[in-house]
Image (cartoon, grey):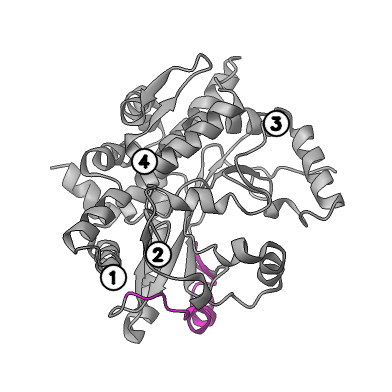
């Protein structure tokens, strides 16, 4: 099977953000996307951004156009959210985002009426019906198909860093799970989801797809649900490992980190160096540690098994990549990583709210709604940094 990899601008950025719809009083999920989407799709036909449905009717997904910079892509996302609010506000529907809803139950949710979703549920049954998960996807353009898999393998070293920064699913179906990101472990239960296979050549990826399609596992490359995957249609690498970010500046910070990592590894390949990787068993252990402990995780950072606090290694990585960030015009967005490290990730904020409310998870939902609505836009956040 020949799988063409589209041409894209090197280190261009595209973002996808899955958002929950909720009742403002009860905090319950609201299955109202079908009544919003026809008008939203009509209104946005000529915009750079899109607003679409997802697996469950309680979700809308906003997607940026192709941005030369992280800021441009995030501006698209902000414009899309503003458009969504023109319909949700009058209807009394609130928006929020986290990797999971604190107390929703799968049996109360409705599946979007599309054949691909019905087929997914029919095949995956209980696990498929439990996919009450929300995430972000970060696309970064790659200028040469031969770089794609080496960069993915190098990015896998930083999967726990991205998971820890974005971790926002400490509660599941009304229970405190003890995990910073329960979503990370739930999502990998789907066939073709989870960690990427450690392939090295594009022909191996083509062979993988041929095997999967021939045996009926999937229809095409869009059903590869790896934590980091090639996106041949767009000419990008797509990072899908992150929980849904709860605010726009946090989304921008993680997107900037992904962009500078991809560009850094691309430059190493250009200079004849092979980007560093670690064995797949370390990658798997790191994923579990980040899901369990979030920003308190110790992660394995090299082939020798050296272990470092993920926070320390993140700070070193950001410092190392700061020249790349300057050249990509995302240095201020990347500085948002330090804000997450000092002020806490979403999972930490949610747990603090729950403890202060004697375990009332409805208060956690109200916190997430307030944070999503009242939290600073990226422009406000960057303006505050410049003073």
Q: What segment is highlighted magenta in the picture?
A: 27-52
According to the image, label 4 marks what residue?
Answer: 294
Q: Name the side, left or right, on which 173 lies relative to 226.
A: left
Mark before the other along the chain sequence, 3 or 4: 3
Tell me if label 1 and label 3 are in contact, CB under 8 Å: no
Residue at 32 percent of width and 74 percent of height: 27
At label 3, counting other C-alpha atoms closer than 10 Å, the crowd grade (few under 14, some 14-19, many 20 or more) is some
Mark toward the viewer: 1 or 3 = 1
Q: Is residue 365 left or right of residue 299?
A: left
Return the residue nearer the eye: 281 or 150. 281
Query: Given this view, does label 3 or label 4 mark the residue nearer the observer?
Result: 4
Give the class, few, some or many, for how many residues have Cα within 10 Å of label 1's Cα (few <14, many ≥20). some
Placement of the C terminus among the 4 image quadrants: top left
Res 281 quadrant in image: top right
Work out whether mark 2 precedes mark 4 in sequence or the reverse, and give the earlier one. 2
Whole-Å distance between the Cαs marked 2 and 4?
18 Å
The first of marks 1 and 3 along the sequence is 3
Mark 3 residue element: loop
Marks 3 and 4, how far apart in space? 27 Å
The residue indicated by pointer 3 is 199
When the figure is inspected, residue 325 is found, relative to residue 39, above or below; the finding is: above
Secondary structure type for disc 1: helix
The residue carrying mark 1 is: 362
For marks 4 and 1, give the CA distance: 23 Å
Disc 4 element: helix
> Residue 158: x, y in percent?
47, 32
């Amino acid at each position: 099977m020949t799988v063409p990899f589209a041409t894209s601008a090197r280190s261009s950025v595209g973002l996808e953000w899955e958002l929950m719809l909720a009742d403002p009083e009860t905090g319950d999920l609201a299955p109202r996307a079908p009544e919003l989407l026809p008008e939203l799709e009509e209104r946005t036909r000529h915009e750079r951004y899109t607003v679409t449905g997802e697996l469950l009717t309680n979700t809308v997904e906003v997607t940026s156009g192709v941005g030369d910079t992280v800021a441009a892509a995030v501006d698209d996302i902000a414009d899309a959210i503003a458009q969504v609010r023109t319909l949700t506000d009058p209807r009394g529907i609130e928006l929020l985002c986290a990797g999971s809803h604190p107390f929703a139950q799968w049996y109360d949710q409705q599946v979007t009426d599309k054949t691909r979703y019905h087929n997914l549920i029919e095949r995956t049954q209980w696990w498929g019906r439990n996919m009450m998960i929300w995430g972000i996807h970060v696309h970064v353009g790659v200028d040469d198909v031969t770089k794609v898999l080496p960069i993915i393998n190098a990015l896998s070293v930083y999967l726990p860093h991205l998971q820890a920064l974005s971790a926002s699913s400490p509660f599941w179906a009304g229970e405190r799970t003890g995990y910073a990101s329960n979503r990370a472990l739930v999502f990998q239960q789907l066939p073709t989801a989870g960690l990427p296979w450690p392939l090295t050549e594009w022909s191996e990826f083509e062979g993988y797809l041929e095997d999967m399609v021939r045996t009926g596992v999937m229809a095409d490359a869009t059903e590869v649900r790896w934590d980091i995957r090639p996106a041949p249609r767009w000419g990008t690498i797509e990072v899908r490992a992150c929980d849904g970010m709860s605010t726009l500046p946090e989304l921008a910070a993680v997107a900037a980190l992904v962009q500078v990592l991809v560009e850094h590894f691309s430059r190493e390949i250009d200079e004849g160096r092979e980007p560093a990787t670690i064995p797949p068993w370390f990658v798997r252990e790191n994923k579990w540690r980040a899901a369990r402990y979030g920003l308190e995780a110790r992660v394995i950072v090299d082939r020798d098994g050296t272990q470092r606090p993920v926070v320390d290694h993140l700070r070193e990585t950001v410092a190392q990549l700061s020249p790349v960030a300057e050249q990509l015009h995302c240095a201020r967005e990347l500085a948002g990583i330090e804000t997450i490290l000092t002020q806490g990730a979403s999972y930490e904020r949610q747990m603090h709210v729950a403890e202060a409310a004697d375990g009332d998870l409805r208060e956690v939902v109200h916190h997430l709604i307030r944070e999503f609505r009242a939290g600073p836009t990226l422009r406000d956040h960057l303006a505050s940094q410049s003073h």
